[in-house]
Image (spheres, rainbow, N blue to C red):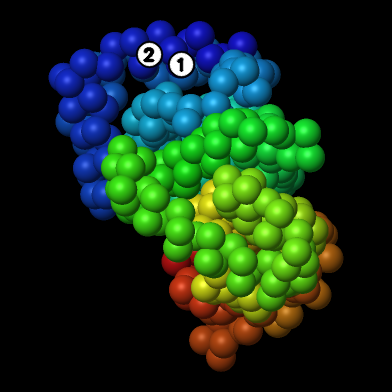
Amino acid sequence: SAYPIYARLTGEKNDKFKEFLNQAVDWLNRPLADASSVECEQYLSRSRILESLRLASRRERCDWEYPIGETNTLLMLLPDVNESRMFWRFQALQVRHLVARKAYDEAIQAAQVGFAMTRHIEQAPFVVHDLVAISCANLMLTQLTAMIEQPDSPNLYWALSSLPAPLVDVRESVELELDMLELSFPDATRLDRLRGDEWTRLLDQLLEAQHNYGSDLGLLNNPREKATYLVECHAKAMRYFVKHEVYSASQLEEMRLEELLVRWMLHPHAVVRDDLLKWTFSSYPSTERWQANDEAAWKFDPDRSQLAERLYAGRLGVLGADVRLQQRLAILRVVEALRMYAAAHDRKLPSQLEDLANVPVPVDPLTGTPFLYDLTPSGSAHLRSRAPSEYSPDYLLHIRPTRDAGSEE
């Protein structure tokens, strides 16, 4: 497993070491030419981090060994995922330095180490690890994009095509987190067998979970405020169950307060979880439409419990991040296919993507259709796609033939 190697690196986590690693961020934000400097080379050589990361990249597995199901999973601390960011930024700087030095073969090998780190981070069980893995992969692709922009760079079509698909698999972590409440509170799966104080204990546990996931109620240690809040919740629960025809009025009257509130807190959770599972692994446009429409029906019900929203807020965000990564990788493969074509056709780009007959041309992972491509009168081209969210711009690449088969700007 690669984890012991990473753990030994994080064992050096004193302030001076962290300050040293954080300097990589500054280098990554500088122009590419700066990364070729002797100063950058000296910075990278001041530690054996790169050698440790190279050794870790040779390991197929990374066993994070989180005690899932053995403790309250909702309250589990994840310090190692934040610490991993420092190391893959350092590795990305190594790739950038080698690209700037035009040591392209070595840069590709360094990028392979970075993508191995991506796979190792993704093997951890939580969505946050997938998001970090996606960030890692994107940073490596940024450095490879800088390589593609160099007129004398090798073509990366087949290297990019050989990466795992998907590069980050979010399915297992999303499924795990949708079951997080049951894993943390087994009593939530056997409501029909709870008696007496068991309802009180489970209610307190659910309130604590809601509080820890962003609630500003401030009532857990204040009996008076807690009692007032529970009275307000009781009124909401009665309206919610009647409105949605979950229980009859007579059934509700027979329930003790704690049972009523527990069932109220858990009911939206079950409904939302099942809907999320249903749509999560459909095509992204379908999921995005559900998020914009059907999700609103439960999210803005004034009488529903906040627990489901607290637990699942942002879970679909990882799907958007994942499809953006897939889309970026696909569009870079198209760019390299275009460069390959230009190299064989007197530095001229094709009039349409259908002319790229020598290699498979990826479609847009977002839409399942080809990317939009336009050849301009000047001989450059526009390659673009609809972004996976209204908050992201379209990709717009200007591909201009050069003396050495083309470049991406």
Residue 242 point in image, percent of width and height = 70, 72
279 lies left or right of 131 = right
* Residue 6, numbered label: 1
- Which amino acid type is shown beneath numbered disc 1? Tyr
At horizontal 63% and vertical 52% (from top left) the residue drawn is 260
Residue 279 point in image, percent of width and height = 76, 61
Residue 186 point in image, percent of width and height = 68, 30
Point out the residue furthest to the bottom here.
377
Q: Nearer the viewer, residue 365 or 75?
A: 75
Packing grade of label 2 (10 A; few <14, some 14-19, many >=20) is some
Q: Is residue 76 above or below residue 327?
A: above
Quarter where residue 332 is shown: bottom right
**Quarter of the image with the N terminus in it:** top right
At horizontal 45% and vertical 39% (from top left) the residue drawn is 208
- Which amino acid type is shown beneath numbered disc 2? Leu
264 lies left or right of 30 = right
Label 1, secondary structure: give it: helix
Tell me the distance, in whole angstroms, between the alpha carbons under discs 2 and 1: 5 Å
Q: Are marks 2 and 1 in contact (CB under 8 Å)?
A: yes
Q: From where the camera sits, is residue 95 visible?
A: yes
Residue 169 point in image, percent of width and height = 69, 42
Q: From where the camera sits, is residue 273 visible?
A: no
Q: Is residue 119 above or below residue 68?
A: below
At horizontal 57% and vertical 73% (from top left) the residue drawn is 301
Packing grade of label 1 (10 A; few <14, some 14-19, many >=20) is many
Q: Is residue 94 above or below residue 250?
A: above
193 lies left or right of 2 = right
* Residue 9, numbered label: 2
At horizontal 34% and vertical 30% (from top left) the residue drawn is 86
